Image (tube, rainbow, N blue to C red):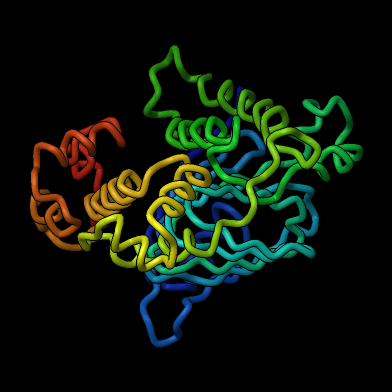
Amino acid sequence: MAQYKLHKFSSEDELETQTISEAVFRPAEINRLDKSGPFDIRADIASIQSTTLWKSSSRSGYRARYGCPKHRQLELHFIEKGKFEFQAADEQIEALPRSAVLLKDTRKVALLASPGSSKLSMVIQVDQVAPHFNSSRDNVGPGLASFLSHIQVDALGVGMIHQLATHLLHSADAEALPEDAIRTPALIHDALMMMFVGFWPKANSVAEAPAALPRHLERAIDWLQHHAEEDVSIEQLARLSGASIRSLQNSFRHYLSTTPNTYILQLRLARVHDELLHGAGNDSIEKIASRWGFGHMGYFAARYRELYGRSPSATRRDKPQPK
């Protein structure tokens, strides 16, 4: 039977973070962006069979360097908030929310995470996917070469991989599973490997990766990430981005499969969710929601439940308690 376990940690010290990372995951050099500024990182790390998943977030942002010279493995990164810059082998990738990154060469990786960033990531051993290529691990390379390195999460099948990975991460605590469901994580893991090989977009497929985000869409996203609590109309956002209203709406729809208003709503809900789980203060849910632009609690609670499948108060009960 597959072995799986879940680790949670929160740290405000680089050395402590590196020590924890090496103990439960892998050696990594992790540093704050600004030597005089704060450092903050939180992560849930789960392992099942030879696959590792982790959900990480950082208010401060950070730089990381690591490498896996002795093992052939892949990394998937699903960007949820902020901006990440990856450098691996001869690839340099700048990734924004709702995009996904595949690193096919992890022998030497450099990563920069912006303040307020979060992502869901996976390390997959080549041995785990080789059977789905109908080949040995030494013959997987040519098949992987066609896999695209940077795509939108909304590409066909990729969103399903993201959702299944999220579910697997939260299923990794065996003690939380009923006895008749103890094999569920192993089954999800095997399905995830099959989906990755079968659904990840490839260079020679019809579903080519969308081009890099238009500059005006990047400007709009960047402004919203830093001013999520501020009221802004579509007219104002278009002006800030340097595009017409129609162009901005079309770009949100084409590249992010959403509308500007829905993007803003989900961004604000994500900020509330983060404060409920990790906020240092004891502000009421109403005050937190108001801080992020929600004036009507009934509307806020309904939209929150739609996105997260539970109430804000239930989320707050999951907040890690200080030791």
Q: Is residue 323 visible?
A: no
Whether 163 is drawn above or below 41: the answer is above
Q: Is residue 67 left or right of residue 135?
A: left
Whether 318 is drawn above or below 129: the answer is below
Residue sitting at 43 percent across and 54 percent down? 248
Residue farthest top in this picture:
180
Point out residue 184 in the picture as x, y percentages from the top left corner. 51, 20
Point out residue 231 in the picture as x, y percentages from the top left corner. 20, 60
Point out residue 195 in the picture as x, y percentages from the top left corner. 65, 27
43 and 89: which is toward the camera: 89
Residue sitting at 47 percent across and 59 percent down? 217
Residue sitting at 37 percent across and 66 percent down? 223
Residue sitting at 83 percent across and 45 percent down? 145
Residue farthest bottom in this picture:
36
Q: Is residue 107 visible?
A: yes
Q: Residue 200 occupies which quadrant of the picture? A: top right
* Image quadrant where one finds the N terminus: top right
Whether 2 is drawn above or below 58: the answer is above
* Image quadrant where one finds the C terminus: bottom left
270 and 45: which is toward the camera: 270
Q: Residue 27 occupies which quadrant of the picture? A: bottom right
Q: Is residue 169 left or right of residue 91?
A: left
Point out residue 5 in the picture as x, y percentages from the top left corner. 50, 38
Whether 197 is drawn above or below 104: the answer is above
Q: Residue 238 occupies which quadrant of the picture? A: bottom left
Question: How many numbered marks appear?
Answer: 0
10 and 129: which is toward the camera: 129
